[in-house]
Image (cartoon, helix red, strand yellow):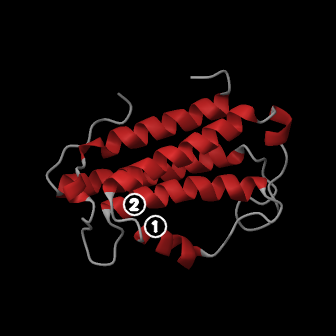
Amino acid sequence: MTDHPFADALTCQRTCFLRTISCFGGEHASFAPVAGMLTVAGHIAHAALTVDWFLQGAFRPAGFDLDFPAHEAAARAVTDLDAARARLSTSYDAAITHFAASPRADLELPIAPGPILGGAPRRAIVSALADHTAHHRGALAVYARLLALTPPMPYA
């Protein structure tokens, strides 16, 4: 942990997510309960790509990229579990590094106007990411149960 509460919160999110998905093996990467749903690898990739999306959207003058079909296609393109896990770690590493290096005053600056957190302080993405990753951790825990796996308690 660091002395930066936002970087520490992101570190905790990553730890809980990785713990939840630790029950999956490579053979589970393509599992989806119903055709058309995200696969295990796709869910993890989506969570990783969303970390990048929040970070970019909060700190760039144009705000958030709202091309959701392209974002979904990028997540669905990831089919390898190890690649998805690596992407999640890389995405969180970048966000943690960015927040740890950012002066607190910069984190209070408003996000560009728009439908996603428009006008909120940049630091607001940390709690938005907590909600988003918790949602996908929960979905992946259900996937694990459907595969007769036992996901570990994320907060151990």
Label 1 and label 2: CA atoms lie apart by 7 Å
Q: Which residue is mark 2?
A: 43
The structure residue drawn at horizontal position 53% and vertical position 34%, both measured from the top left corner, is 11
* Direction from residue 122 to residue 40 in the image, left or right: left
Disc marking residue 1: none
- Is residue 146 visible from the viewing direction of this image? yes
Task: Label 1: state its secondary structure.
Answer: helix
Dot 2 crowding, Cα within 10 Å, few <14, some 14–19, many 20+: many
* Direction from residue 112 to residue 72 in the image, left or right: left
Q: In which quadrant will I find the C terminus?
A: top left
* Direction from residue 53 to residue 11 in the image, left or right: left
Q: Quadrant of residue 42?
A: bottom left
66, 97: nearer the viewer: 97
User: Residue 81 at x, y = what percent?
Assistant: 32, 55
Dot 1 crowding, Cα within 10 Å, few <14, some 14–19, many 20+: many
User: Residue 112 at x, y = what percent?
Assistant: 82, 60
Q: Amino acid at mark 2?
A: His
Which of labels 1 and 2 is toward the front? 1
Above or below, 147 against 78 in this view is above
The total number of labels drawn is: 2
Pointer 1 with pointer 2, Cβ within 8 A = yes
Task: Label 2: state its secondary structure.
Answer: helix
Q: Residue furthest left?
A: 148
- Is residue 130 visible from the viewing direction of this image? no
Which of disc 2 and disc 1 is earlier in sequence?
Answer: 2
Q: Which residue is mark 1?
A: 75
53, 83: nearer the viewer: 83
User: Residue 152 at x, y = what percent?
Assistant: 27, 37
Q: Amino acid at mark 1?
A: Ala
Above or below, 43 against 9 in this view is below
Above or below, 27 against 108 in this view is below
The structure residue drawn at horizontal position 38% and vertical position 41%, both measured from the top left corner, is 18
